[in-house]
Amino acid sequence: MPYIFLNQLGEYGRENHAENINYIPEESKDSFLGSFIGNRERFQAQHYQNFIKYKKTDFARNNEGFSVINLINAPEDLPDTYFRRQLIYLIYSRIQNGEIKAIKDVSMRGNPETATISLKDLLGDEGITLYQYALQEEVNSPEYRLVVVNEAISHVEGNKTLQRPIMYVAGPSGCGKSYSSQFLSQYACDMLEKDPDNDSGNVFISIDGGIGRDVSQMRRLMILLSNVCGYTGVKDLYDYSNGIIAPIKNHLLEAAIDTPGVGIIIPETFSKLVIPFNSSSAMKRLNELEDSTLIFTRIKSEHYPSMRKTVKDMGDSRSWKSEGYYDLMDYDLNRASLKESKKYNPQYFENGRKGSYKAQKQYMNLHHSPKLLIECVYDLQYLKPEGDDWVPARYFEKEARPFSQRVYNDWHQTDRTVSLPAYAKAHPEPEMRFSSEAREALEENSPYVHKNLNM
């Protein structure tokens, strides 16, 4: 079993996005990668300092023995995957010795949060520290950082804009900010003046903290292990991981800012703005960047209680495995279908709703022109098929899926020869509302594209 994991370390797959880095202009690519991937010597030094602390523990000596750890006397002697390998060996040992209690026949449907396991029960006290060293090792690796970059980069075809688009996508946690970004980036380009002689399109880098969590093999290893043992996830995995992964988001933002001509998308809850007198210093800074235009978008709803319920259901559905089991043959560190093991906190919704609205007001009060504001209307609800129609459902019910209320109503007015899932796939864009200056910008810079747009 250990070798199944060992052979996957640093091999992230994701071939669909593996070449996205090539969208970065050639003259800027080396400096961008140097800025984000960082200095290898610095990472080696940090890696070695963790090793020095680790090798002093009884756990390390019992796990590996003096003879091996004393052979490592300098940063360059320490293998790049040392801690990740030690973690895998620890897991194998705990499984062989029956130290991880497996559960069976637990009903995951309805309340999967009750069938989670703690990281301590999975790894033991010392194993938690080893996990954090392994995660730090991974996050500092060039392979990890390159895959984060490739996942964060997108490209919008057409003529390149004269100004660099920088776009906030604001809204509560779990409301679809990352999903909406794929449509909003096109509108961001359409609102800006183009270079008629440059049809290379626009490159965007998404500063999305979820990417760093999603690609991490060490996080996935913990989730897989819990699932194989019959649990729905690791209830405190986020608590032990976020402090290590979260800084990647800021590193990526700084590298993007320093790369001329590259657009930036920032999904953001602005939850800290609920504190009185707080404001976004990052927004002020981005607004002052040369040759750039700051655009603000917000996910809103006409009926927040309904939005809150659906967002919670979607958050819960992403958090915990709710059906089926994995066995030893399912050890794939890059499995696409893994749940997040990130508990959804309903309070995040209110903080994000109020904070994003406050951020919108801050944007509208900035000293700049034009005020390019887009509001996306959130109207998702869970439905399940019943006869020739679809009816309201809970997320854990069989065949339940989220659909836009507007799309459902439009589909209901058709002859329904096309299924609702197929109709929704053909109409993926949410309803959008534009400020007067945003409408004027679209009409001026992309009149033919948006001549029939209802604004």
Image (cartoon, grey):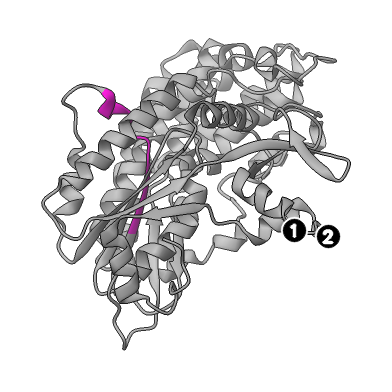
Labels 2, 1: front one:
1
Furthest residue toward front: 413
Residue 177 at least partly seen: yes
Image height check: is 324 above or below 259? Answer: above
Which of 87 and 17 lies nearest the eye of the viewer? 17
Between the residue at mark 2 and the residue at mark 1, the CA separation in whole angstroms equals 8 Å
Question: Percent position (x, y) of residue 201?
Answer: 40, 75
Could you tell me how many numbered marks the image carries?
A: 2
Image height check: is 235 above or below 365? Answer: above
Helix, strand or loop at mark 1: loop
Helix, strand or loop at mark 2: loop
Residue 24 at least partly seen: no
Residue at 48%, 65% in the rendered image: 20
Q: In the visual, does 294 lie left or right of 96?
A: left
Amino acid type of disc 2?
A: Thr
Query: Within the magenta stretch, is there residue 266?
Result: yes
Q: Quadrant of the C terminus?
A: bottom left
Q: Which residues are magenta?
A: 264-274
Q: In the visual, does 417 lie left or right of 392?
A: right
Question: Percent position (x, y) of residue 58?
Answer: 49, 11
Query: Within the magenta stretch, is there residue 361?
Result: no
- Residue at image mark 1: 414
In the figure, residue 84 lies in which quadrant? Answer: top right
Question: Percent position (x, y) of residue 40?
Answer: 34, 49
Find residue 417 and name its label.
Answer: 2
Q: Residues within 10 Å of mark 2 (few under 14, many from 20)?
A: few
- Callouts 2 and 1 close, C-beta under 8 Å: yes
Q: Quadrant of the N terminus?
A: top right
